[in-house]
Image (cartoon, rainbow, N blue to C red):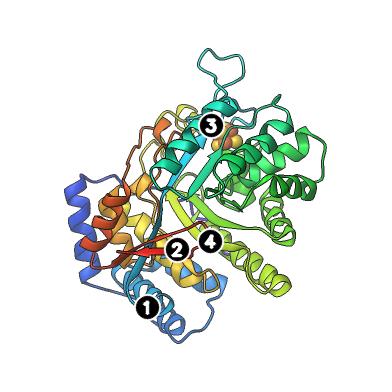
Amino acid sequence: MEPLEQVRPLKQAEPMEQLERIHEALARPEPTPAVERILHKALDGHRLSYEEGCVLMREGDLGSLGLVAGEITRRLHPGGIVTFVQDRNINYTNVCVTDCKFCAFYRHEKDSDAWVLSHEQILQKVGELAASGGTQVLIQGGHHPKLPFDYYTEMCRLIKRHYPQIAIHSFSVSEIRHFARAYKMPVREVVERLREAGLDSVPGAGGEVLADRPRRIIAPLKDPAADWLATYEIIADVGLRGSSTMMFGHVETLEERVEHLLRLREVQDRTAERHGRGVFWSFICWTFQPGNTPLVAEGLHNGVTTSSYEYLRTLAVARIFLDNIENIQASWVTQGVRIGQISLDCGCNDFGGTMMEENVVAAAGTVFHATPSDAIRLIRDAGRVPAKRNTFYEILEIY
Ligand code: SF4
């Protein structure tokens, strides 16, 4: 592998300055000869190597990457359809024993502002989502040391009993692995029992960057990257699918971002070989939000958020590199709706969830919300055709 180069997030420009810079870059592709050769290879339908991915991640200009990522997206999703899902995030507890240094959300059990939602509170929230026409609930929480496993399985059963139309896209891989440890069960049994209780799909959170050097810095108590990836193979074997993610712009190198993409691509290949389809519905990346996090308090990060320019560049490389993952989702929750719109020109074909409620990113001081009608308007304004989808990427309605 190439020598590691520490990523230094670009200085955060004023929003207007930043938008102008992005529009200028998109209008004027300026590839180096190496980048041009690799992009032609991708456009000819050939898979890129790790080294080629690194060249794009290091040298690729936003204009050239966006152009090619956009073309690949048009080939994969003709007709200009951009999907979104009407969903709600529910965080059942902020109590966590894992102390990730990038997280502003968690509390310890004895903290005065620690909380756990009751099943009644969760059902009420799901009921509000169902009443508004939503189709998916994304339930996640901290790694609580004492809640019984029944708390989770009963939660799923109750939701399915009262709101069978709501898909449960819930519990990150790191929660699943925490359950296995806490309740002394094999990971496979945890996934099987959650599936029996009603779990429909697993969101990809907890992956951060799937390279062990940065993981040891930002989340020293989380499992190594190989365990996260192996869990998705188990999820596929049990008959479920999920999303893949990457949270970047903290202490990882550009090469480690590509390593992450490579490892996702390998799991997708392996699970497709065994089951006829890869385990990942989609890929979503977002930037580390440094506000109120131990990583900044401990001097491990300078507190500057990675720029939207760098977000879009990384997103475009992901679209080009991940040739076996069909859907790439915009992350307007961290980037804002304008950048969410521009990301449709850089490889995204999905606007993600409208998120009636979001607490984790909000704890770091970043809060963006959209209603379904906002999503429809924003997608239309970006010159695309909005469509509501379900968790399984089936289109429910075209607007
Ligand atoms: S990211 Fe998740 S696992 Fe890590 S401290 Fe926050 S709540 Fe806990």
Q: Tell me whether the residue at label 3 lies in contact with that at label 4, contact meaning CB atoms closer than 8 angstroms.
A: no
Q: Marks 3 and 4, Cα distance to the nearest angstrom?
A: 23 Å
Q: Which mark is residue 328?
A: 2
Where residue 245 appears, as percent x and y from the top left, is 52, 54
- N-terminal label among 3 and 4: 3
Mark 4: few, some, or many residues within 10 Å (few <14, many ≥20)?
some
- N-terminal label among 3 and 2: 3
Check disc 2 and give the amino acid type.
Ile
Check disc 4 and give the amino acid type.
Phe
- Quadrant containing ligand 1 reads top right
Q: Marks 3 and 2, Cα distance to the nearest angstrom?
A: 29 Å
Which residue was labeled with disc 3?
Answer: 122
Q: Marks 4 and 2, Cα distance to the nearest angstrom?
A: 14 Å
294 vs 332, left or right, is right
387 vs 219, left or right, is left
Q: Residue at x 35, y 56 (%)?
A: 310
Q: Secondary structure at mark 4?
A: loop
Check disc 3 and give the amino acid type.
Ile
- N-terminal label among 1 and 3: 1
Q: Which mark is residue 78?
A: 1
Q: Which mark is residue 392?
A: 4
Where residue 375 appears, as percent x and y from the top left, is 30, 53
Q: Marks 1 and 3, Cα distance to the nearest angstrom?
A: 39 Å
Q: Secondary structure at mark 1?
A: loop
Quadrant in the picture for residue 84 = bottom left
399 vs 206, left or right, is left
Where residue 251 appears, as percent x and y from the top left, is 50, 45
